[in-house]
Structures are given as structure tokens and as C-alpha cells.
Amino acid sequence: MQFLLNCPVAPRDSTPKATVHHGDINLKEATQGGNRVSGWSLAAAGLALLSMVPLVSVGVTAGMATGENWQHLVSTVLGTYLLNSLGLTVGVGLFALAVGTGTAWLTTMCRFPGGQHFSWLLLLPLAAPGYLLAYTYAEFLDFAGPVQSALREALGSDFRLPPIRSLPGAILVLGLSLYPYVYLLGRNAFLEEAERLTEASRLLGCGPWRSFWLVSLPVARPSLAAVPPWC
């Protein structure tokens, strides 16, 4: 309080301030810059139109189908295709969300041997296209692949892994190739927002898992919600 009372008071500026009258502003000049279309806007619009070409082509092709073709698809494979697509979307989204969030929290909040290396090693799936990862996993985990062949030699000829060329296998492969997007957003949220709050909760007596569910995850939820279900 003493410091506040002894502080010198700055003299009041007596210089007259310039006043701006609304009538002096030309509304046409003020809004002229906002109506211009830049080259970046045109480029973004062109890229958006190019990305819509596959959807438009599918819609046009579906509209050109005759009634007999639609009846045949509905009665045979359409229901299976829709269920598989829905299951693939939901499964990949949940798998990528779980793996990306878990690895982001572990590398940010926990200290373990090699943690600094794992923080960038977990981004390596971004360096390979999804179809290349699919071929690699299919060849390695297939019945005649090196993994199952080695396991049959060690555990017996009757040992078999679940087939990789299936819906769960597709969810596994796509989830392992897309989780880095969730990992990046989750790690950034944990580093910038949740780290201090988590430390405060630990000082107040919360355990690691309780701090994760009650503090870290709610704080990072807006960033994780920005990831679409198909990543």
C-alpha cells in the first residue's frame, strides 16, 4: 500500500486529441478492400472444386443407373456395403482417437526411458501412404507371411492369427496410419493447456489416471473434437 501511495502520478496530457467525425469517412473506400477476391481465395475455391469431383462423379453414376440395377444392388450387396462402410468409419475413428490420445498423454505427462525418441517416432506413419502401409501389414501378417510362419514354428502348426484381410484388419491398418493426426492435436493440447492443471491436480492428491480423466482429457477435448471420425 505504501508503494502505491508514493508512486508519482503521471501528468495529465493536455494536448487536444484529434476527433474523427463519421461524415469524414468514405464508406465506399472503407469497404472496398473487403470486396476484393484475392488469388488465394480463387486457389482455395479451385482446390475445393477438385476435391468434390469424385463425389460428383459417384452421384452422377448413381443417377444414371437403371431401376433394375438398383433393385439388384439393394437385394444383394448394398446393405452389406453400407454396414461395412459405417463400421469402418466408426472403428477407425475410435481406434485412432484412443491410440492418438493415449500416446500423446504418455509422451507428454510421463517420464520413461526413450520417451523423447517416442515423441517423434510416433509420427512416422505420416511418412508412408495408407495403401503402402496396407500392403505391408497384409504381407507381414498374412497366413503365409513371416510373422505367422515364425509363430507356427514356435507354437505349433495349428496356431493362426485372425485374418488381416477383414473388417477388423482394415480398421487396424487404417487406424495405425491415421492416429498421428490425433496425436499431434492431443500432444499440443496437453503441452499448452493441460500440463499445469495436471500438476496442480497431482499436488492436490489425484492419482495419474484420475488426473487424466478429470483434468487432462476434458481440457484437451476441444482439440480432439476437431479431428473428424475418418481423420
Image (spheres, helix red, strand yellow):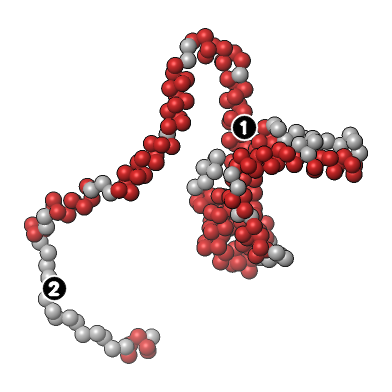
* Residue at 35%, 41% in the rendered image: 45
Q: Quadrant of residue 211?
A: bottom right
* Residue at 35%, 45% in the rendered image: 43
> How far across and down, in percent of the image, does residue 3 sit?
37, 88
Residue 210 visible, this angle: no
Dot label at residue 87? 1
Dot label at residue 33? none
Q: Quadrant of residue 153?
A: top right
Which of the two discs, 1 and 2, labels the residue nearer the N terminus? 2
Q: Is residue 225 left or right of residue 111?
A: left
* Residue at 52%, 42% in the rendered image: 228
Quadrant of the rendering where the C terminus is positioned: top right
Q: Nearer the viewer, mark 1 or mark 2?
A: 1
> How far across and down, in percent of the image, does residue 150 sit?
85, 43
Going by the numbered disc 1, the residue's amino acid type is: Gly
Mark 2: which secondary structure?
Answer: loop
> How far across and down, in percent of the image, does residue 98 sit?
63, 47
Cβ atoms at labels 1 and 2 below 8 Å apart: no
**Residue in the foreground of this view, choosing between 186 and 135:** 135
Residue 148 visible, this angle: yes
Going by the numbered disc 2, the residue's amino acid type is: Lys
Vertically, is 71 above or below 94?
above
Residue that numbered label 2 is attached to: 17
**Residue in the foreground of this view, choosing between 174 and 211:** 174
